[in-house]
């Protein structure tokens, strides 16, 4: 008789947990995946997927406006928020089903319940009030928005969870944060016709990205009509008698809006999981501490994805899941490779990026060549739209290695995926130069920037002749 009920018990049915469970089950392992809410986790249910659908919805007004330059007369358009929500719900319902079926079709058991640790090999399934045992346990419980409990009136705010199911589209919104979520939602709401203000505590939105991209996006957002206030934080949120919210910000200005959204980072879901019953160590933010193989300090307990607070991205959680299966079930210890991750911000215009920013590269390399092109995409000219595209390559002058590639403009995210392969493969600027352009495209600019726009020597910018 088997020593345990399961070879693997996964707590959390998001992108990482489902992938690990499905692949392990496919290897013939006896697997259960427990999910307390809906299979699919943050990405599918209240993250990347519905966000992208909202991005598409918010882009239509610009498409309608651009159409005139191409000879189209578009009748006055109107937008129905409940239709968007209902169609989005249908789509995520479909995807959630696919996630659950993925586990089941591979031979695993999908359990709809919260699950907590009793001891190193025992899990309590709350909805069924029973315990099961497992040889290996994987924690993939993800994270949730930081509630900003220290902010007076934070209870009036919405977060990236509620934003997907608001009963009605607000007429005005103030969003706090300068990261992916705040910037993406500022653009979504503005595109949907909402009067939008973004407030950020730092000097420039999107810390960690290339400064050129940050400044250019900031300027583009303001030009569209989004109010962006840097060096600004909320002091207090109050509810007015008419139900609207008054956000008091640094300096005393009061921003009145229908909704106030906080997007100031996410915190790991590690409370009440029974970690203390087993002695699994957590860090200062509550994240589960793991070694390079995603193993906790307890030998048979592992953790992947946002709950470990390494890099909070869906593809990272999926990659960590694949490495975990290699390590735990294929006798092939595999460390997740988190170097050179391509990523996109689905702002409008979009940012796609991979590798080092100019500033980061300048700290690490003595001599850089910066190739930079700013131009108006062909499509925008006849549309009479001013939005410009920005493409930038950061190159190590000594080895010719392309260290960073940054793009702002239409489909920048799609381009970042392909550039990610080039940078991961360690291609040089000469390889880019040898590559034939695809014409006419926006992306051809990436292989046609022959002369550096400027140089960086020991951190100093040097103009080229
Ligand atoms: P981010 O870490 O991207 O940004 C958090 C922002 O909140 C930063 O601008 C930060 O400022 C600011 N902040 C933090 N604490 C405070 C505070 N106390 N008061 C005011 N501002 C504060 O987090 P998000 O919430 O935007 O997104 C969470 C994660 O989800 C991201 O790490 C990202 O990896 C992932 N995500 C990815 C997406 C994508 O790939 N397109 C889309 C959406 C989310 P500062 O810069 O000064 O630290």
Image (tube, grey):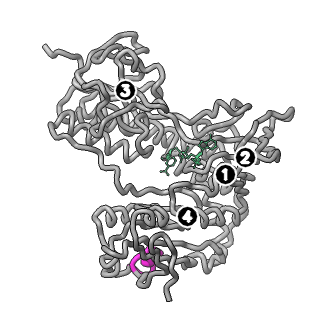
Q: Residue furthest bottom?
A: 465
Q: Earlier in the sequence, mark 1 or mark 2?
A: 2
Taking the magenta stretch, the answer to whether it contains residue 361 is no
Q: Residue furthest front?
A: 458
Q: Which sits in the foreground, 152 or 319?
A: 152
Q: Which residue is mark 2?
A: 173
Q: Which residue is mark 1?
A: 189
Q: Residue furthest top?
A: 129
Instruction: Classify 10 Å Cα crowding around label 2: few (below 14), some (14-19), many (20 and above).
Output: many
Q: Earlier in the sequence, mark 2 or mark 3?
A: 3
Of labels 3 and 1, the one closer to you: 3
Contact between labelled residues 2 and 1, with CB atoms less than 8 Å apart = yes
Taking the magenta stretch, the answer to whether it contains residue 444 is yes
Q: Secondary structure at mark 2?
A: strand
Q: Give how far across and how far down residue 245 sits, in percent.
A: 78, 38
Q: Give how far across and how far down residue 154 sits, in percent.
A: 69, 33
In the displayed structure, 326 sits above or below 425; it is: above
Q: Earlier in the sequence, mark 4 or mark 2?
A: 2
Find the magenta span and give its range.
Answer: 438-447
Q: Earlier in the sequence, mark 4 or mark 3?
A: 3
Q: Which residue is mark 4?
A: 211
Q: Which mark is residue 11?
A: 3
* 141 left or right, relative to 170: left
Q: Can you tell me whether the CB of the residue at mark 2 lies under 8 Å from the nearest atom of ligand 1?
A: no
Q: CA distance from mark 4 to mark 2?
A: 26 Å
Q: Give how far across and how far down residue 14 sits, in percent.
A: 41, 35
Q: Earlier in the sequence, mark 3 or mark 1?
A: 3
Instruction: Classify 10 Å Cα crowding around label 3: few (below 14), some (14-19), many (20 and above).
Output: many
* 339 left or right, relative to 23: right
Q: Quadrant of residue 165?
A: top right
Q: Please report the residue visible at 57 percent of the width from the left and 50 percent of the height from the top.
A: 179
Q: Is residue 414 visible?
A: no
């Amino acid at each position: 008789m088997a020593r345990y009920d399961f070879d693997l018990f996964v707590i959390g049915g998001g992108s990482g947990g489902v992938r690990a469970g499905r692949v392990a089950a496919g290897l013939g392992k006896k697997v259960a995946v427990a999910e307390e809410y809906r299979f699919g986790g943050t990405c599918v249910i209240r993250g990347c997927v519905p966000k992208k659908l909202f991005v598409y919805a918010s882009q239509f007004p610009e498409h309608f406006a651009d159409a005139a330059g191409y000879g189209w007369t578009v009748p006055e358009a109107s937008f129905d928020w409940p239709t968007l929500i209902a169609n989005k719900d249908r789509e995520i319902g479909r995807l959630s089903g696919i996630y659950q079926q993925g586990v089941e079709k591979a031979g695993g058991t999908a359990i709809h319940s919260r699950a907590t640790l009793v001891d190193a090999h025992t899990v309590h399934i709350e909805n069924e009030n029973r315990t099961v045992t497992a040889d290996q346990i994987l924690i993939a419980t993800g994270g949730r928005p930081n509630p900003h409990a220290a902010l007076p009136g934070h209870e009036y705010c919405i977060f990236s969870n509620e934003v997907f199911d608001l009963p009605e589209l607000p007429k005005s919104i103030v969003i706090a944060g300068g990261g992916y979520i705040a910037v993406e939602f500022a653009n979504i709401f503005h595109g949907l016709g909402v009067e939008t203000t973004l407030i950020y505590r730092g000097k420039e939105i999107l810390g960690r990205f290339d400064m050129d991209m940050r400044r250019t996006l900031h300027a583009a957002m303001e030009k569209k009509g989004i109010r962006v206030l840097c060096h600004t934080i909320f002091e207090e949120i109050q509810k007015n008698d008419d139900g609207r919210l008054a956000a008091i910000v640094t300096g005393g200005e009061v921003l009145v809006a229908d909704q106030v959204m906080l997007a100031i980072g996410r915190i790991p879901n590690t409370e009440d999981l029974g970690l203390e019953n087993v002695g699994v160590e957590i860090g200062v933010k509550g994240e589960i501490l793991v070694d390079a193989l995603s193993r906790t300090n307890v030998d048979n307990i592992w953790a992947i994805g946002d709950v470990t607070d390494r890099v909070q991205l869906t593809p990272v959680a999926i990659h960590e899941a694949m490495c975990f299966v290699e390590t735990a079930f294929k006798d092939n210890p595999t460390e997740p490779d988190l170097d050179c991750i391509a990523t996109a911000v689905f702002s409008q215009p979009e940012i796609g990026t991979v590798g080092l920013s100019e500033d980061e590269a300048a700290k690490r390399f003595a001599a850089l060549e910066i190739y930079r092109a700013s131009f108006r995409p062909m499509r925008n000219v006849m549309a009479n739209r001013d939005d410009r595209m920005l493409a930038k390559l950061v190159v190590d002058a000594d080895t010719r290695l392309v260290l960073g590639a940054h793009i702002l403009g239409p489909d920048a995210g799609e381009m970042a995926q392909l550039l990610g392969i080039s940078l991961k493969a360690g291609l040089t600027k000469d390889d880019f130069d040898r590559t034939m352009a695809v014409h006419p495209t926006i992306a051809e600019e990436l292989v046609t920037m022959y002369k550096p726009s400027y140089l960086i020597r020991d951190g100093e910018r040097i103009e080229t002749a």
